[in-house]
Image (cartoon, coloured by chain):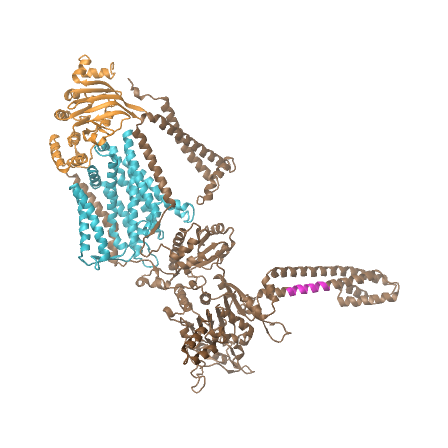
Chain colours: A orange, B brown, C cyan
C-alpha cells in the first residue's frame, strides 16, 4: 500500500530524514516509533503530501505522492499532529466541508457524515462549535475528518497526544477497530500504544530507519527483550 | 548522544557572515545616502537632466569637492552598496551550486516561475507605460478634443516647445473692478483646473507643452518667475504687464495672452441667481477653439492700428500737460490686448508762423523726431562754424598784436580795429582789459604803450582760453546731436518716408500694412463750458480722403470718433469734409447738431444767473446699449452686456455733448444685425447752437434751450427736427463696400439695365449682375458720435471695454468677444428637501454602520449558542 | 473543481461567523459614509462651491474644500488597511493554527486553494461596494418612474435576473453542480440581452431612469474600484502567505498597499508636466481615480497595472504555497 524508497528531506542545510526506505502492506497496522525530533512527523507529512521530499520516491496505493498528488491524497486519510481544526465552525459543518473538499457528492456525504459521527461518538456534540470542544473531542473530530471519505490508508500522527487515560483507551479501541478495515500508519513515541494497537513497527532515529518489521520479528532480533529495551538500545540512550 | 545532524559546518558559518555583511551594507548605504543628500546641492529629480547629474555629482563629492561630510556620505553609500552586491552575488551562487543537489527539479522550476512572473509583470507594465489608449466614456465627450483642433495639433507635433503659464493675479477683470469675492475665487480655481485638464489633453499630441501655474500671492512666486523666464525676457514682460488673471502662451520668443474670462467667462449675475437663488457658479465657455487658436497661432503677428489725427497733441503719445487731448489711454488699452499702435499726423505747419495755412501732410511721430534731430544737427554745425570763425579771428588778432608795427599811427589804428572787433564779437576778457585801461582816463601813448600791451596780453590769454572752450563745447554738442540722429535715423522707414514728398503716396504707404484705421475728431467736449476744439480744423484734404477710401475698399475696417461740428453760430459747414461724405456712402449719416441733456439745462440756467461754477459738475444720465438679442443682436452691444454681467460692476457710460449718428434709411436690410447700438437717454435734445453767447459786458444773450421745431418749418419731420428723443450715438456697419466705389460705370450700367429691363430682361439682369459681381469685400465700420470718448491718459473701465470690444470686432477677432452661445457650465446640483437630506446624511454615517454592527453582534451571538 | 467551490463557500461564510468581516464592513461603511456626506453637502451647497464629478468625492479625490482633501487622504490611506483586514486571515491564520496542513493534504491543488481564497475575499469585497450602490441615486441624481411595461424583452430581462439570483442561491445551498452552472450562464445571458434589447427597442420602458448628472463616471468608477481592489486583495493574500501572524500580515499588506497610494500625494511637488509625473501617475492608484475613473475616462494603463499585478500576486502566492512544501 505504502512504499517509501530512499526518502531524503533537507530543511535547508539540516537533513531531517536521510535515506529512509520501508513498505507497508495492505491491511497492516504499522507503528512509527522514534524519539522526539527523529523525523517521524516529517516522514508522515511527506506521505500525506504536505511536504515535498528532497530526494527519493513515495508511492501510496500505487500513486506517486509527488507526480500524482491528487489521486494519492484521495487514498489517504491524514490526521496531523496537533489536530488542527477550524474553530469557528460547528462539528457537522466542519465535517460536511471536509467531505466536500475531499470530493464527496452531496448524498454520499450525508451518509458518510452520519456514519462517521456515529463511529467517532460525536453525535451529542455535532452542533457544537469546534472551538468549545475539549481536546478529546477534537481528536475525535480529527479522526472523523480522516475517515469521512473512506480512504484505504489512514495516516495518524500521534493520535493520543494529550488525552486523558479514559480517552486514550477509547481511542485505542477505535483504532483497533479501524485497523481491521483500513491500512494504518500510526506515529507515536508511546511504546505501550504500539504494543497495544500495531502489528508492525518501524523505529526511526536521527533521520534513519533503525528497525523495521513485525513486532514479533523485532523482539526476536533483539533477544526477546521488551520493546522498551530495544528502543533504548537503538536510540543510544544506554547508560543514561 | 548529541544529534549528528545538528553540527555547524564552516560553510554555514561563512554563509551567515556574508548575510550579516550584506545587511550591514544596506544600513550603511542608507545612512550614506542620507548624509550625501544633506551635504550635496539639491538635484531636481523632476527632470531628466537632474537624474543624469547624479553620478557626476557623486564623483565630485568622492574627490572631496563638496566637503568632508559629502565625501564620507558618498563613500558609505558606495561601500554599503558594494557589500550588498557581494552578499547577493554569493547568495545567488550558493543557491545555484549547493542548491542543485538538494533541491528537486520542482524547486528550481518554482523559483524560476516566480522570477519569470515578476519579470513578466515588469515587462508588461513597461510596455503599457508607453503604449496606451484612453477612452472617453462621458455622456457629452468632455475629454475629447474637437477633431479639427486635434488635426492641427497633430501637425504641430514636432514644433517648438510651448510653455503655458497660468498666471493667477487674483484680479478677475483687469481694470473693470478690483472686487474679489467668493465667486471670483471659485472661478479662478475652476479655470486653473480646467486649463490644466485641457493642456493634458493637448499633451496627448506631443510632450512639448509645459504648464506652470504661478500665483502672485505665493511665497515662491518671484523665484519661480525668475526660473521660468531666464532667457525669455518677453515672457517676463508679459507676466508683469498682464492686467488680470491670464493664460500666457510662450513659444519661439513670442507670447500670446488669453484672459481667464476669455476662456471661461464668469457670469456673476447668473451665478447669484442660479438654482432658485441658492447660488451656484456659472461659467460661460468661450470655446476650446479660443484656447487652441492661441496655442496654434503664437507666431501670429500683432494687428496694427493707425490713429490719424491732425495735431501732435491729439496723438497717442502722452505729452506733458496735454493728457486731456491725447489718446494715451487708448494706446495702453490696445497694446495690452495685443495691438500695435502707430500715429499719423495729417497736418503740419501748426507752429510755423511763416506759412499762412495748414498744409496737408502725413507723417508719423518718429519721422517728426527725425526732422527735429536733423534740425538739431544743422544748428549745432552752424554753432560750431561760428565758434571756429570767432576763434580764428581772435588768433589773427593775437598774431598781429604779437608783432607790433613801428609806425605809431598804424599801431593806434590796429588798437582801434581791435577794440571794434572786441565789441562785435563780445570778447569779454579783452573788453575788460580795455575798460580797465579807460578807467585810468588817459590815452594810449608811446610812453604807456608797454603797460597797455601788458593788459591786452593778459586779456588775449584769457580770451583764448574761453574761445577754445567755446569751440570744444560746440563740437561736443554737434557730436551729441549727430549721435541722437544716428540712433533714430537707423530706422529706415522714417527716413524713407520723409523722402517721399508726395502726401498721398506717403499716407498710402503708411497705412499699407495697417489693419485698423482710427479717425478721432476731438471737437466739442462740454457744451456748457464751451470746451473743445474747432471742428473745421479736422477737415482733411481730398488726397488724404482718397487714401482712406482705398483703405476701405480693400475691406479693412475703420473706427471713427467724430465729435459735433457745432460752432457758436451754428453747425460749421467747413467741418463736413470728404470723410463724412465717405461715411454717408457707407450708410452712416451724421447729424449736424450736438445733443444736450435736460440736466445740462440747469447748468446753462445757472450760467445765465451769473454763477461761477456753471456747467462743470453736472451729473448726466448714462447711455443705453441696444437691447436686441438673438441673431440680430449687435455684436458690440451684446459683448458689452455680457461683460456687464461678468463684472457686475455698473459699466455705465456717460458722454457729454455727443453727436447723433444715424444709419442711412434703407440700409437695414443690408445689415445682418441692428446697426445703431448706443443711445442717449430720452431726456435729451439735439441743439444746433449749443453755445452760450454773451455781449461785451459779460451778460448772457443766448442760452441753449429746447425749442421744438414748429410744424411749418421745413426741418419738421426730418432727422434735423429739434426734438426730445433717445438719439443713437454709435453705429456699426458690416456690409460689402458700395458698388459705386468699385465700378465707376456702375450707375451708368444700372441706368442702362433699368432701361433695358422692360425689353430685354436677360441683358438687364446680366448687366446688373455684372455690376454686383465686382469684387466687393465686406467691410466693417464703426462710428461714434464723440471725439473725446477715448481720450485721456488712462481709460475708464467702461470706455476701455467698449474700445476693446469694438477693436476686436472690427479687426475680425470675434473669437475674443465674450460669447454666451454655448451651454453654460455650472456645478451639478441635486434637489433634495431638507428632510431627505438629513435622512441621507444620518443613514450614511450612522445607520448603515450601526446596522452592520448590530448584525455582527447578532451573528456572533447566534454562533455561540450551543 | 467541486473542492474549490466548497472552499469558496467556507471562506466566504467564515467572514460572517467571526468578527473580522463585520469589523471590516463597519470601518468601510463609516469611511464611505463620511465621504458621501461630503459629496452630498457639496451637491446641495449654497453658493459658488460645488462638485463637478460626484464620484470624485466618494473616492477621495477632491482637493478644494480642505475637509474633502483630508477625507480623501484618509480614505486612500485606510483602503489598503481594509483590504488588509479582509485578506490577512486567509493564509496566515491557517499557518498559525496549523489548519494549512489539513488543507494542503486534502485532494485539492495549490492553485485551487489560492483561487478559492481569492474568489471568497473578492466576493466579500464586491459585497462591501455593492452596499454603497445605495448612494448612486443621489450621486447621479437619478429619477425613476416606474411604468411596469410588460413586453417580451422586459420579461426576458426579469427572468434573467431571477435566474441569476437563483444561481447564487444554488451555489450557496449546493444544488446540483450542473444546474448551478446552467443557471449562472443562462441567467446573466438572458438578463443582459433582454436588458439591452428592452432599452433600445421598446418604446415604453419598465422603469424610466433619468440621470441628472452624467452616470457614466459612476460605472467607470465602480469598474476601477473592482479591479484596483482585486490588486490590493491579491497583494494582501500574497503577504498573508508569507507570515504566520495575522497582525504582521495586516501591517505588511498595509505597507505594500501604501506603496501604491503614497506617490499620489507627491503630485503636489511635481507638476503634471514634469518628467517624473507619468511614472508617478502609473503607480499611484488615487491618481487613477481622481483623474480618470471618477471622471468617466478609461485609461488602459491602470487596467494593465491592476490585472498584471493581481495575476502576478496570485501566481506568487501559489509558488509560495509550493515553496512551503519544499522547505
The relative height of residue B601 versus residue B641 in the rendered view (above or below) is below
The relative height of residue B113 versus residue B246 in the rendered view (above or below) is above
Q: Is residue B379 magenta?
A: yes
Give the percent coordinates (x, y) of residue B858. 18, 43
Residue projecting furthest to the bottom: B712
Residue nearest the viewer, comparing C122 with B582: B582
Q: Magenta region, mostly helix, strand or loop?
A: helix
Residue B635 placement: quadrant = bottom left
Residue nearest the viewer, comparing B101 with B732: B101
User: What is the span of residues highlighted in magenta in the rendered image?
Assistant: B374-386
Q: How many numbered tags mark residues here?
A: 0
Whether residue B468 is visible, yes or no, is yes
Q: Pick the quarter of the image with the N terminus of chain B.
A: top left
Give the percent coordinates (x, y) of residue B737. 46, 72
Whether residue B247 is visible, yes or no, is no
Residue nearest the viewer, comparing B84 with B37: B84
Give the percent coordinates (x, y) of residue B648. 39, 65
The relative height of residue C59 versus residue B703 in the rendered view (above or below) is above
Amino acid at each position: 500500500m505504502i512504499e517509501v524508497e530512499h526518502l531524503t528531506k533537507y530543511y535547508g542545510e539540516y537533513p531531517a530524514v536521510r535515506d529512509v526506505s520501508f513498505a507497508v502492506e495492505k491491511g497492516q497496522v504499522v507503528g512509527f516509533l522514534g524519539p522526539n525530533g527523529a523525523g517521524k512527523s516529517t516522514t508522515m507529512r511527506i506521505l500525506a503530501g504536505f511536504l515535498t521530499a528532497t530526494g527519493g520516491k513515495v508511492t501510496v496505493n500505487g500513486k506517486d505522492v509527488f507526480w500524482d498528488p491528487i489521486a494519492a491524497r484521495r487514498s489517504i486519510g491524514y490526521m496531523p499532529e496537533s489536530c488542527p481544526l477550524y474553530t469557528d465552525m460547528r462539528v457537522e459543518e466542519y465535517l460536511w466541508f471536509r467531505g466536500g473538499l475531499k470530493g464527496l457528492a452531496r448524498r454520499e456525504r450525508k451518509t458518510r457524515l452520519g456514519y462517521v459521527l456515529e463511529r467517532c461518538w460525536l453525535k451529542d456534540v455535532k452542533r457544537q462549535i469546534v472551538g468549545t470542544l475539549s481536546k478529546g473531542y477534537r481528536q475525535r473530530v480529527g479522526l472523523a475528518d480522516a475517515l469521512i471519505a473512506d480512504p484505504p490508508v489512514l495516516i495518524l500522527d500521534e493520535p493520543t497526544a494529550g488525552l486523558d487515560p479514559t480517552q486514550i483507551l477509547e481511542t485505542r479501541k477505535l483504532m483497533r477497530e479501524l485497523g481491521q478495515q483500513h491500512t494504518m500508519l500510526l506515529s507515536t513515541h508511546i511504546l505501550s500504544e504500539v504494543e497495544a494497537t500495531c502489528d508492525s513497527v518501524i523505529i526511526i532515529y536521527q533521520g534513519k530507519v533503525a528497525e523495521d518489521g513485525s513486532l514479533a520479528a523485532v523482539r526476536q532480533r533483539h533477544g526477546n527483550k521488551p520493546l522498551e529495551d530495544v528502543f533504548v538500545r537503538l536510540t543510544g540512550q544506554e547508560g543514561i | 548522544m548529541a544529534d549528528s545532524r545538528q553540527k555547524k559546518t564552516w560553510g554555514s558559518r561563512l554563509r551567515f557572515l556574508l548575510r550579516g555583511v550584506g545587511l550591514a551594507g544596506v544600513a550603511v548605504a542608507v545612512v550614506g545616502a542620507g548624509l550625501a543628500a544633506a551635504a550635496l546641492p539639491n538635484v531636481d529629480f523632476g527632470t531628466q537632466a537632474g537624474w543624469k547629474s547624479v553620478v557626476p555629482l557623486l564623483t565630485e563629492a568622492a574627490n572631496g569637492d563638496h566637503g568632508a561630510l559629502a565625501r564620507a556620505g558618498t563613500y558609505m553609500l558606495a561601500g554599503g552598496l558594494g557589500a550588498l552586491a557581494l552578499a547577493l552575488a554569493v547568495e545567488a551562487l550558493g543557491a545555484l551550486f549547493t542548491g542543485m543537489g538538494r533541491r528537486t527539479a520542482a524547486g528550481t522550476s518554482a523559483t524560476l516561475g516566480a522570477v519569470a512572473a515578476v519579470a513578466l509583470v515588469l515587462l508588461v507594465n513597461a510596455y503599457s507605460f508607453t503604449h496606451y489608449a484612453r477612452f472617453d466614456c462621458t455622456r457629452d465627450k468632455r475629454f475629447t478634443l474637437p477633431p479639427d483642433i486635434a488635426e492641427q495639433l497633430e501637425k504641430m507635433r514636432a514644433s517648438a516647445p510651448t510653455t503655458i503659464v497660468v498666471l493667477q493675479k487674483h484680479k478677475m477683470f483687469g481694470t473693470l473692478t478690483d472686487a474679489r469675492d467668493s465667486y471670483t475665487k471659485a472661478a479662478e480655481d475652476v479655470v486653473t483646473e480646467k486649463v490644466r485638464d485641457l493642456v493634458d489633453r493637448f499633451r496627448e499630441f506631443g510632450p512639448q507643452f509645459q504648464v506652470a501655474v504661478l500665483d502672485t500671492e505665493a511665497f515662491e512666486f518671484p523665484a519661480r518667475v525668475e526660473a521660468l523666464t531666464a532667457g525669455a525676457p518677453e515672457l517676463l514682460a508679459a507676466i508683469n504687464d498682464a492686467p488680470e488673471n491670464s493664460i500666457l502662451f510662450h513659444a519661439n520668443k513670442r507670447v500670446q495672452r488669453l484672459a481667464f474670462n476669455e476662456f471661461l467667462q464668469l457670469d456673476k449675475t447668473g451665478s447669484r441667481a442660479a438654482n432658485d437663488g441658492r447660488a451656484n457658479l456659472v461659467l460661460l465657455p468661450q470655446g476650446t477653439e479660443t484656447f487652441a487658436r492661441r496655442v496654434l497661432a503664437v507666431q501670429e503677428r500683432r494687428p496694427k492700428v493707425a490713429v490719424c489725427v491732425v495735431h501732435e497733441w491729439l496723438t497717442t503719445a502722452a505729452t506733458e500737460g496735454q493728457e486731456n487731448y491725447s489718446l494715451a489711454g487708448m494706446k495702453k488699452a490696445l497694446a495690452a490686448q495685443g495691438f500695435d499702435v502707430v500715429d499719423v499726423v495729417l497736418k503740419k505747419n501748426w507752429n510755423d508762423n511763416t506759412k499762412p495755412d495748414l498744409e496737408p501732410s502725413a507723417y508719423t511721430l518718429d519721422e517728426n523726431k527725425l526732422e527735429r534731430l536733423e534740425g538739431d544737427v544743422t544748428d549745432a554745425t552752424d554753432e560750431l562754424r561760428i565758434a571756429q570763425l570767432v576763434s580764428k579771428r581772435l588768433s589773427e588778432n593775437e598774431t598781429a598784436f604779437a608783432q607790433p608795427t613801428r609806425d605809431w599811427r598804424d599801431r593806434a589804428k590796429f588798437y582801434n580795429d581791435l577794440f571794434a572787433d572786441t565789441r562785435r564779437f563780445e570778447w569779454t576778457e579783452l573788453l575788460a582789459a580795455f575798460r580797465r585801461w579807460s578807467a585810468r582816463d588817459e590815452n594810449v601813448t608811446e610812453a604807456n604803450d608797454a603797460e597797455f600791451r601788458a593788459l591786452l596780453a593778459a586779456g588775449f590769454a584769457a580770451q583764448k582760453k574761453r574761445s577754445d572752450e567755446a569751440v570744444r563745447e560746440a563740437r561736443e554738442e554737434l557730436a551729441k546731436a549727430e549721435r541722437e540722429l544716428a540712433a533714430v535715423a537707423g530706422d529706415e522707414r522714417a527716413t524713407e518716408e520723409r523722402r517721399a514728398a508726395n502726401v498721398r503716396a506717403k499716407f498710402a504707404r503708411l497705412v499699407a500694412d495697417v489693419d485698423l484705421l482710427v479717425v478721432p475728431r476731438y471737437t466739442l467736449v462740454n457744451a456748457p463750458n464751451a470746451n473743445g476744439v474747432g471742428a473745421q480744423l479736422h477737415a482733411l484734404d481730398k488726397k488724404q480722403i482718397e487714401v482712406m477710401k482705398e483703405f476701405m475698399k480693400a475691406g479693412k475696417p475703420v473706427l471713427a470718433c467724430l465729435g459735433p461740428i457745432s460752432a457758436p453760430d451754428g453747425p460749421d459747414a467747413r467741418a463736413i469734409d470728404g470723410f463724412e461724405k465717405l461715411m454717408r456712402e457707407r450708410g452712416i449719416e451724421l447729424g449736424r447738431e450736438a445733443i444736450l441733456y435736460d440736466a445740462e439745462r440747469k447748468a446753462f440756467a445757472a450760467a445765465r444767473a451769473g454763477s461761477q461754477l456753471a456747467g462743470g459738475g453736472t451729473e448726466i444720465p448714462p447711455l443705453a446699449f441696444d437691447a436686441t438679442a438673438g441673431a440680430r443682436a449687435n455684436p458690440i452691444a451684446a459683448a458689452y452686456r455680457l461683460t456687464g454681467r461678468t463684472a457686475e460692476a455698473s459699466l455705465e457710460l456717460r458722454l457729454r455733448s455727443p453727436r447723433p449718428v444715424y444709419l442711412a434709411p434703407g440700409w437695414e436690410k443690408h445689415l445682418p444685425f441692428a446697426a445703431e447700438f448706443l443711445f442717449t437717454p430720452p431726456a435729451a435734445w439735439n441743439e444746433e447752437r449749443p453755445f452760450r453767447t454773451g455781449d461785451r459786458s459779460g451778460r448772457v444773450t443766448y442760452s441753449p434751450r429746447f425749442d421744438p421745431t414748429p410744424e411749418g418749418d421745413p426741418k419738421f419731420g426730418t432727422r434735423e427736427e429739434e426734438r426730445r428723443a433717445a438719439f443713437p450715438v454709435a453705429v456699426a456697419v458690416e456690409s460689402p463696400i458700395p458698388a459705386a466705389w468699385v465700378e465707376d460705370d456702375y450707375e451708368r450700367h444700372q441706368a442702362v439695365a433699368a432701361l433695358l429691363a422692360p425689353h430685354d430682361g436677360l441683358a438687364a439682369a446680366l448687366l446688373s449682375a455684372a455690376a454686383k459681381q465686382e469684387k466687393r469685400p465686406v467691410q466693417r465700420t464703426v462710428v461714434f458720435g464723440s471725439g473725446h470718448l477715448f481720450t485721456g491718459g488712462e481709460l475708464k473701465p467702461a470706455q476701455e471695454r467698449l474700445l476693446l470690444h469694438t477693436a476686436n470686432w472690427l479687426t475680425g477677432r470675434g473669437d475674443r468677444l465674450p460669447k454666451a452661445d454655448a451651454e453654460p457650465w455650472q456645478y451639478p446640483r441635486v434637489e433634495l428637501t431638507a428632510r431627505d437630506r438629513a435622512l441621507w446624511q444620518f443613514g450614511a454615517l450612522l445607520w448603515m454602520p450601526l446596522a452592520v454592527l448590530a448584525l455582527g453582534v447578532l451573528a456572533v451571538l447566534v454562533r455561540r449558542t450551543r | 473543481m467541486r473542492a474549490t467551490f466548497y472552499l469558496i463557500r467556507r471562506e466566504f461564510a467564515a467572514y460572517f461567523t467571526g468578527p473580522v468581516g463585520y469589523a471590516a464592513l463597519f470601518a468601510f461603511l463609516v469611511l464611505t459614509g463620511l465621504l458621501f456626506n461630503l459629496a452630498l453637502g457639496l451637491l446641495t451647497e449654497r453658493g459658488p462651491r460645488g462638485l463637478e464629478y460626484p464620484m470624485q468625492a466618494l473616492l477621495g479625490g477632491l482637493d478644494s474644500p480642505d475637509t474633502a482633501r483630508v477625507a480623501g487622504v484618509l480614505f486612500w490611506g485606510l483602503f489598503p488597511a481594509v483590504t488588509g483586514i479582509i485578506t490577512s486571515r486567509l493564509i496566515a491564520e491557517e499557518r498559525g493554527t496549523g489548519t494549512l496542513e489539513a488543507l494542503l493534504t486534502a485532494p485539492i491543488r495549490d492553485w485551487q486553494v489560492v483561487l478559492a481564497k481569492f474568489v471568497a475575499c473578492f466576493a466579500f469585497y464586491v459585497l462591501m461596494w455593492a452596499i454603497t450602490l445605495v448612494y448612486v441615486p443621489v450621486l447621479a441624481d437619478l429619477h425613476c418612474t416606474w411604468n411596469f411595461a410588460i413586453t417580451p424583452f422586459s420579461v426576458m430581462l426579469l427572468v434573467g435576473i431571477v435566474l441569476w439570483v437563483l444561481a447564487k442561491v444554488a451555489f450557496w445551498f449546493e444544488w446540483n453542480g450542473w444546474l448551478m452552472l446552467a443557471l449562472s450562464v443562462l441567467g446573466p445571458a438572458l438578463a443582459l440581452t433582454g436588458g439591452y434589447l428592452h432599452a433600445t427597442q421598446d418604446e415604453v420602458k419598465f422603469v424610466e431612469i433619468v440621470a441628472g448628472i452624467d452616470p457614466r463616471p459612476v460605472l467607470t468608477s465602480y469598474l476601477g474600484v473592482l479591479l484596483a481592489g482585486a490588486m490590493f486583495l491579491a497583494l494582501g493574500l500574497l503577504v498573508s502567505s508569507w507570515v504566520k501572524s495575522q497582525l504582521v500580515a495586516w501591517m505588511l499588506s498595509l505597507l505594500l498597499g501604501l506603496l501604491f497610494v503614497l506617490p499620489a500625494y507627491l503630485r503636489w511637488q511635481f507638476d503634471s508636466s514634469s518628467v517624473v509625473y507619468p511614472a508617478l501617475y502609473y503607480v499611484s492608484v488615487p491618481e487613477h481615480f481622481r483623474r480618470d475613473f471618477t471622471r468617466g475616462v478609461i485609461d488602459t494603463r491602470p487596467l494593465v497595472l491592476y490585472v498584471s499585478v493581481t495575476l502576478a500576486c496570485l501566481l506568487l502566492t501559489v509558488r509560495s504555497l509550493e515553496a512551503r512544501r519544499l522547505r
